[in-house]
Image (spheres, grey):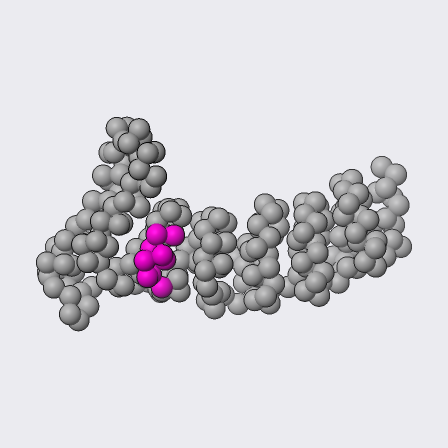
Amino acid sequence: MIKKNKALVQKGDTDWTFGQTLALLLLLVPLRDLWRPFGGAVQKPLGRSWATRSCSELINLGAGSYYKDLSLVSATQDRHLDVVKYLLEHGANVNSEDRHGSTAVQAAISCKDLKTVEYLLDHGANLNKYDVKDQSIIDLLFDAIERCFNAIVKHLLEYGVNAEYALISASYSNNLDAMKLLLDYGADVNFQTKNGDTALRGAVQMGHLNITAYLVEHGADMTLTGEKYHSIFSWAIL
């Protein structure tokens, strides 16, 4: 196994260190799954997951930054937020890439794991792999608004993601805090979709009085019409 993976050994690494670490990494997932039927009662008092304890053992055995960085992306892909936290606390680079060029935040976004996305962004992960118009980033913004992960919303707005359509999403989702963020970052309170939908229309349609009042206070135009709708009052009377 060591010979086949010589390319992964960095300068200064020994065969013993690499082989031992790789073997433990390969055993981690199957041993975790075998442990579950027997280890539930033991894991709780220890306060850390089996995956985190195994990761700790690897670090104690001398795993360097190279292995920590590789493990960070893998832990994110496997939705092990506890391991992600442990690795970052012990020196892993939050913006490191795996052998395929993927970062941890990319993995979390792909998995739609908003808790991990939020944690990584709060700890310095950057979004440089994405264009502000990438669909995955836009989807993340809408998902964060709908599920009230407003810290992610703020990170995305700071990165430059367009806030216009998101304002309507916040209206339908009754997320007032996201609404305030979007307007603070320059969203047009009277932005209309092609069929004439607006944030105010969405708030009225869904019966979200707090959103409706906030939008009106911040200049929402109740007289706007569009291809599909005549006026805001057509929804108010339904």
List x then y, in percent, for residue 39: 27, 31
Residue drawn at x 74%, y 57% is 193
Relative depth, front residue between 89 and 134? 89
Visible residue check, residue 195: no
Quadrant location of the C terminus in the rendered image = top right
* Side (left or right) of 56 relative to 203: left
List x then y, in percent, for residue 91: 32, 61
* Side (left or right) of 98 relative to 198: left
Residue drawn at x 66%, y 53% is 178
* Side (left or right) of 145 relative to 12: right
As for residue 211 lying within the magenta part, the answer is no
Task: Point out the stretch of residues depicted in magenta.
Answer: 85-93
| 139 lies above or below 234 | below
Give the residue furthest to the bottom. 11
As for residue 92 lying within the magenta part, the answer is yes
Relative depth, front residue between 228 and 172? 172
List x then y, in percent, for residue 213: 82, 49
List x then y, in percent, for residue 85: 38, 52
* Side (left or right) of 50 relative to 182: left
Visible residue check, residue 119: yes
Quadrant location of the N terminus in the rendered image = bottom left
Residue 157 sits in which quadrant?
bottom right
Residue drawn at x 27%, y 36% is 33
Residue 218 sits in which quadrant?
bottom right
| 47 lies above or below 193 | above
Q: Say how many tags the image has.
A: 0
